[in-house]
C-alpha cells in the first residue's frame, strides 16, 4: 500500500518524515554509526556527544521516498534528566550496545525501561550490537545477543561504524518497520494527515516546512543525506 505524500501550499510536495532516536551507553559508537550513515566517514578520535546530534537520511520504500530525522542522543548518565525531549515524537528506536563492552550489554534493561516510560509500546525498537569488526576484544556472542533480542521482542543486527558493516542495513530495517506501522494505521484511518515527527502518534496536523534541504536517494545501500552535527 503506497502512502499519499503530504502537500503544503502551491503544489509543493514534502515526503513523509519520521523521527528515529538512537540510545545506549556512552562510548558504544552511536555517533560513529550516524556519521558513517550520514557522510560515509569514520573519526576514531571523535569526542563524546553532549546533548544530541541530528542527521537526515531517506530511503525508497514501495516507491515512496521516506525521510528520517535521526537523533543521536547522549548516553551519559548525568544527562538522563533530559530524556523526554529526546523521545518525544519518536517513530522508531535504535538501541545500541558495544559487543566489546559487557557493561553496555548489561545496561540494556535499564534503557528498555526508560524507553517504555516515554514511547508507545508499539513503536519499533531495533537492537544493534556495534563494533563487530573487533573480533579480538569481543565479549558478547551473537547467540547471546540474539537470545536477548528474541526474549524481548526486538530485531537484532550487528554493525561497525568503523568498517561500515551493516550500517545501511540497520537504518533501512528500522525505517521499514516504522513505515509498515504507518501503512497499517493509514489503512484504518485513510482521511488522517499523520505528522509522526511531532507526536509519534496519529494526529491530524499538517507537516511544517523544514529548513533542511530535500533529501533523496537511498535504495538499499546508497544514501544521500544532510548532517547538522549539533552539539548542545
Image: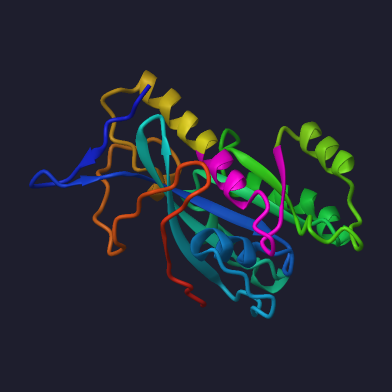
Q: Is residue 22 left or right of residue 57?
A: right
**In the figure, 224 relative to 145: above or below?**
below
Q: How is the image coloured?
A: rainbow
Residue at 78% from the left image edge and 51% from the top image edge: 108
- Whether residue 58 appears in magenta in the rendering, the answer is no
Residue 228 is situated, as x and y percent measured from the top left of the image, at 43, 70
Taking depth in this image into account, of 136 and 120 the one nearest to the observer is: 136
Residue at 69% from the left image edge and 64% from the top image edge: 162
Magenta part of the chain: 155-175
The quadrant of the image that shows the N terminus is top left
Q: Residue furthest top?
A: 188
Residue 180 is situated, as x and y percent measured from the top left of the image, at 48, 29
Residue at 74% from the left image edge and 64% from the top image edge: 28
Q: How many marks?
A: 0
Residue 21 is situated, as x and y percent measured from the top left of the image, at 55, 54
Taking depth in this image into account, of 132 and 185 the one nearest to the observer is: 132
Residue at 24% from the left image edge and 44% from the top image edge: 206
**In the figure, 23 relative to 168: above or below?**
below
Q: Is residue 159 left or right of residue 35?
A: right
Q: Is residue 74 left or right of residue 102?
A: left
Residue 101, quarter of the rendered image: bottom right
Residue 161 is situated, as x and y percent measured from the top left of the image, at 66, 61
**In the figure, 211 relative to 60: above or below?**
below
- Whether residue 170 appears in magenta in the rendering, the answer is yes
Amino acid at each position: 500500500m503506497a502512502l499519499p505524500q503530504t502537500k503544503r501550499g502551491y503544489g509543493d510536495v514534502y515526503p513523509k518524515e519520521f523521527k528515529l532516536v538512537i540510545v545506549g551507553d556512552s562510548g558504544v559508537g552511536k555517533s560513529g554509526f550516524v556519521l558513517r550513515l550520514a557522510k560515509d566517514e569514520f573519526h576514531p578520535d571523535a569526542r563524546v556527544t553532549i546533548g544530541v546530534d541530528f542527521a537526515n537520511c531517506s530511503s525508497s520504500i514501495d516507491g515512496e521516498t521516506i525521510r528520517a530525522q535521526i537523533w543521536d542522543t547522549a548516553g551519559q548518565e548525568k544527562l538522563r534528566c533530559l530524556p523526554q525531549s529526546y523521545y518525544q515524537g519518536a517513530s522508531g528506536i535504535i538501541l545500541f550496545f558495544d559487543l566489546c563492552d559487557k557493561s553496555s550489554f548489561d545496561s540494556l534493561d535499564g534503557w528498555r525501561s526508560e524507553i517504555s516510560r516515554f514511547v508507545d509500546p508499539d513503536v519499533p525498537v531495533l537492537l544493534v550490537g556495534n563494533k563487530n569488526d573487533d573480533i579480538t576484544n569481543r565479549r558478547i556472542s551473537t547467540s547471546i545477543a540474539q537470545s536477548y533480542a528474541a526474549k524481548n521482542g526486538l530485531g537484532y543486527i550487528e554493525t561497525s561504524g568503523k568498517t561500515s558493516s551493516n550500517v545501511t542495513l540497520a537504518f533501512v530495517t528500522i525505517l521499514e518497520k516504522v513505515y509498515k506501522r504507518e501503512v497499517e494505521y493509514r489503512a484504518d484511518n485513510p482521511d488522517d494527515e499523520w505528522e509522526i515527527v511531532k507526536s509519534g502518534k496519529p494526529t491530524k496536523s499538517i507537516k511544517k516546512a523544514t529548513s533542511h534541504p530535500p533529501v533523496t536517494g537511498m535504495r538499499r545501500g546508497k544514501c544521500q543525506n544532510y548532517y547538522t552535527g549539533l552539539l548542545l
